[in-house]
Image (cartoon, rainbow, N blue to C red):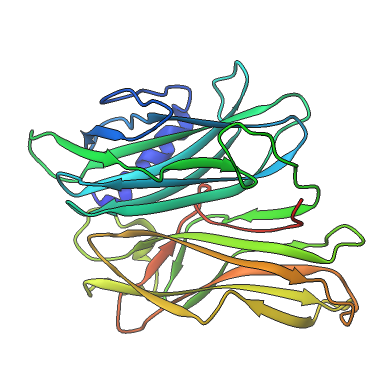
Amino acid sequence: MHRGTVLRTALALMLMLGVSVVTIGTPATAATTGRYRTQPMRTVPAPVNLGLSVTVKAGTTHLVSSYLVVGGASTLTLVSHLVYCRLAGSATVTERIVTGQNVLRATKVTLLTRALVTAPATGDLTCRLYAIFFRLTTGRVGGTINVLSGTSLMQSGTSLNRLATPIQSSAQTWQDGRVLVNTSYRAAPVRFTPVEGTDSIQAFGDVNVTVCYDGGKDRGSCLGAGSRRSALFASVGTQLVVQQLQADGTVCRTMVNGPLVATRISNTIHHWKFNKSVSNIAVSSTCTSPEFRAYLRVTTSRIANSIVVEENHQSETALYVRP
């Protein structure tokens, strides 16, 4: 099975079977660190509960973020980094945040996944940290991977279950559907008008991409028109763009996180999450509107492979007022 297909199948099954959270290997504690068994390809995803949680109080919004640090994999391993949020006593996943990447043998990788999470007025949401570890090798030889120090789950800048001041004004857009990118694309565009009296806002954008390449039986969106799949890598440029608008909708001013920077992603690594942020963006009175829009600019090199921007709560853009 193609590695991209494995990840998409895992995500689809998690949505259908999200009520079943199975721990494999050594049960996790609040320390989260330890060595875990990987599961074979073509098996039902078995999320590992890594023992960390935060609670988003009813009717509030918080920035929930998680770092998953892994290393020492005994073989090439597909790591899915998951935050699932549920109401008390419910098996239904109300909110979820997802990251996926292939981790090479004996390497260390840090994965960040984050989003604005709003709990319904009817009850608190408890968000827990999970991971799925697929070994991307054939045969019956088992595999293992380490969860390392630095793994964490936080809300609005506080650790574990410490309460934090909720975010009162925000907007967030998730990527709607998988999109083939041969040249450039604006991922998950969002518009936001902060509450009156706001001096500055915060912005972040995260995008998960998959490298297209020949060799898999099911390449999905990578079969689209103009797709390049013959190279050994993709060269992906990413940049978070934030614009304050005029009253007529035209652009008044533009802010970016920095230069458009290209990252080379091999066919073996295959999946990659880009995390971009812009802090303390002033709400300028010289513009005729306080409205903002933001998006993740994603580009690909014409001498390398195309990519797919992933959906399913893997890619989003958010604007908010710091509490």
Residue at position x 33%, y 35% from top?
33
Q: Residue 251 in the image: x percent, y percent?
A: 77, 81
Res. 34 image quadrant: top left
Residue at position x 77%, y 50% from top?
323
Give the vertical position of 164 relative to 111 (above or below): above
Q: Residue 205 in the image: x percent, y percent?
A: 58, 62
Res. 277 image quadrant: bottom right
Who is closer to the viewer here, 7 or 87? 87
Q: Residue 88 in the image: x percent, y percent?
A: 63, 19
The answer to whether 291 appears left or right of 310 in the picture is right
Identify the residue at the far top of this view: 89
Q: How many marks?
A: 0
Residue 183 showing in the rendered view: no
Res. 49 image quadrant: top left
Give the vertical position of 267 relative to 30 (above or below): below
Residue at position x 77%, y 75% from top?
244
Who is closer to the viewer here, 123 or 295? 123
Who is closer to the viewer here, 235 or 36? 36
Q: Residue 284 in the image: x percent, y percent?
A: 84, 76
Residue 58 showing in the rendered view: yes
Residue at position x 37%, y 81% from top?
301
The answer to whether 15 appears left or right of 74 in the picture is right
Give the vertical position of 146 relative to 248 (above or below): above
